[in-house]
Amino acid sequence: MTDRRFDPSKMAKLDNPERRKALPPEKILSQLGIQANDAVLDLGAGTGYFTLPAAKMTAGKVYALDVEPQMLEVLRERVSEQQSDNVDLVKGAIEDIPMDNEVVNQVIASFVLHEVEPLSKGLQEIRRVLQSGGRCLCLEWEKKAMEQGPPLNHRIHSDEMKKAFEDIGFTVTSLSFPTESHYIMIAQK
């Protein structure tokens, strides 16, 4: 585990009432425009904060990728409890997504791109697995000092993130700030 990776012993932070109030997953996912049969990839799926709501929005496959076996095991239990039969768990890193080219319509990258080294490799992988016209929702911490979240030197300013997506060939179609600490960027292939 690099010093940038989320510590799985802190997974309770991923799904708490304060986070749900500030960043409601269904409302955020509505910006992605998931269609009835879309295939969706949730990068750094963790405990399923976005995976499980996405699975209710599509009859297509929802791939939940995480590098941490501990996270995938918790998510496996949650998927079973909710009887989400369209979720596939995938162990792997964002820098080397173990999936074929152009297999998903939508990608969710929630609070994970600041962990990717180098960022350009992760974005190339997202572009590779996305079908033409596919979209990526990037939810990240703005690069400003605050008590919560990753260290300031790990954060990526929204302007830098936009440029990084564009440098890989994406078109950034929207940028919003749901809180003073976070931004949501939608990038289209």
Image (cartoon, grey):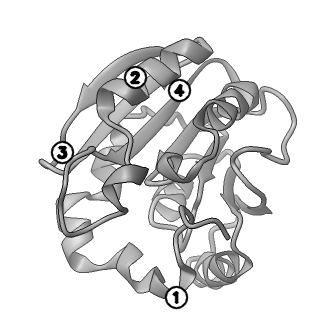
Q: Which residue is mark 3?
A: 178
How far from the left and from the top, in percent, is residue 7? 53, 78
Residue drawn at the location 42% of the way across and 34% of the way down: 32
In the image, what residue type sits under mark 3? Pro
Evaluate if marks 1 and 3 touch, with contact meaning CB atoms under 8 Å apart: no
Q: Nearer the viewer, mark 3 or mark 2?
A: 2
Q: Which residue is mark 4?
A: 135
Q: Which residue is mark 1?
A: 9
For residue 186, what is the image quadrant? top left
Residue drawn at the location 66% of the way across and 59% of the way down: 64
Q: Nearer the viewer, mark 4 or mark 3?
A: 3
Label 1 and label 2: CA atoms lie apart by 31 Å
Residue 162: which numbered mark, if any? 2
Residue drawn at the location 50% of the way across and 23% of the way down: 164
Residue 70: which numbered mark, if any? none
The local crowd at label 3, few if under 14, some if 14 to 19, many if 20 or more residues have their Cα within 10 Å, is some
